[in-house]
Image (spheres, grey):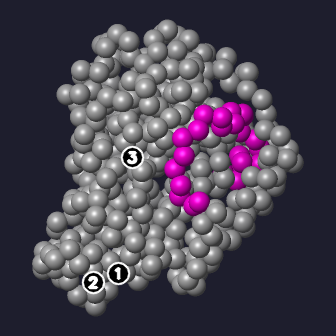
Amino acid sequence: MRVQRTLPPSAAPIDWRDLVEGLVGLVRPHVAMQRLQAEFRAHFGVKHVWFVSSGKAALTLILRALQALSGRSQVVVPGYTCFSVPSAVVRAGLSVRLCDMNPETFDFDFSRLAEAADSEVLCVLATHLLGIGVDVPRVAGICHPQGIFVVEDVAQAFGGERDGKPFGSMGDVSFLSFGRGKNITCGSGGAILTNDDRIGEALAREYAQLPDESLAGQIKNWLEVAVTQLLINPSRFWFPAGLPFLKLGETKFYTDFSITRMDSVRAGLLRRWQKRLSCSMASRMDHAEQLRRSVPSHVQTVTPSGRGQSVYLRFPLLMRSKQEKDALCRKSAEQGLGISALYPCAVNQIKELSGTRSSQQVPESTMIAERLVTLPTHEFVSNGDLVRLCAALDSVQENQGLDVNHVLEAPGVERRAQELPRAH
């Protein structure tokens, strides 16, 4: 365990005012929930909003509601995505079908999507992975003629938009996540949004069957949020990061997750969500742009498809090999830089899904899993951290026997430090 400034790979700051609002929500439950629903309806321009215990709980409810309306059983998901997505599909009693991705945009390979969109498919998940916008209207153009629903996955992209429409308002139904690693958090939680009355009625039936979160669960979540905020600051994150048994950042596939209604404590923790989201977006987009200008030319960045505003939960880079990726992650662990891989494998390689239709080949998604690293973009990242991140990229480049003059910016750390703007 090394005592040093250590960046968490992702972070969503909460201050004492948010913690107080969480306790206020406990004593004024109906006010907290009704206010939150009204604010989300106005922000997204939708008629129907439900809040539940997590993003994967939200997706599970959506899939159950859509299946009741359609009777189909196949769900198309990107070949590389959060393990929570296929776990929710399995929890809903449906089958996973994969579609490969375009590594240049992190959008679908649309020729593959057109092939996959047949009469067995219930819905397609349009996932804004890492906050990078995908072309939801194009997905809908392929799906709707086939009677296929489009579910917009905004778990990592709250705050993004396309053509003036917020992510979450373009699919037939969408969901968000307020987990600890997202743009804003209340510990755990999720939201479901739709403008479709028929889908809304089916979701209302599903929601009516959900239990409430227990009082013990509400207090436990509040305490976990408070402790997380104490330790997530880079001056203290070295401590939890140095405890292997915590398994921070570990990706697991499991289907026995809780599905309940969101409680008023979590709603209270989200009381200032608009202000917090604005601050989060400003930092993430600014840091992403600075990193984009500074990364070595041999490292592939991701360019969102179409027009819009991506929010970059983390900044993705595709290294030239798994070995180069591993070398960079080791250096990051030594120096506390917050550089990390994302999910350990493509969905077809998740062992719990072996023997299912998920075993189909998705070569581009597999390549992304092998070569992807992500750089932190959150509000704790300083100008000095950006300099250190760029220096680490240069160092790995040198160790691989490459010409450091291939860097887009001047290679000197001192020059980078002078050119980086002051932190907000």
**Label drawn at residue 387:** 1
Give, as a three-letter code, the residue at label 3.
Answer: Cys
Relative to 59, does residue 263 appear above or below in the rendering? below
Could you tell me if the residues under marks 1 and 3 are in contact, i.e. CB atoms within 8 Å? no
Where's residue 278, x and y in %? 50, 58
Q: Nearer the viewer, residue 343 or 374?
A: 343
Relative to 128, does residue 341 appear above or below in the rendering? below
Asked if residue 51 lies left or right of residue 88, the reply is: right
- Range of magenta residues: 247-271
Labels 2 and 3: the sequence-earlier one? 3
Q: Give the CA distance from mark 1 to mark 3.
A: 30 Å
Residue 12 visible in the displayed image: no
Could you tell me if the residues under marks 2 and 1 are in contact, i.e. CB atoms within 8 Å? yes
Where's residue 99, x and y in %? 31, 31
Asked if residue 416 lies left or right of residue 270, the reply is: left
Give, as a three-letter code, the residue at label 1.
Answer: Val
Q: Give the CA distance from mark 2 to mark 1.
A: 6 Å
- Quarter holding the C terminus is bottom left
Tag 3 secondary structure: loop
Residues packed near mark 2 inside 10 Å, few (<14), some (14 to 19) or many (20 plus): many
Asked if residue 23 lies left or right of residue 276, the reply is: right
Q: Which residue is mark 2?
A: 416
Q: Which residue is mark 3?
A: 345
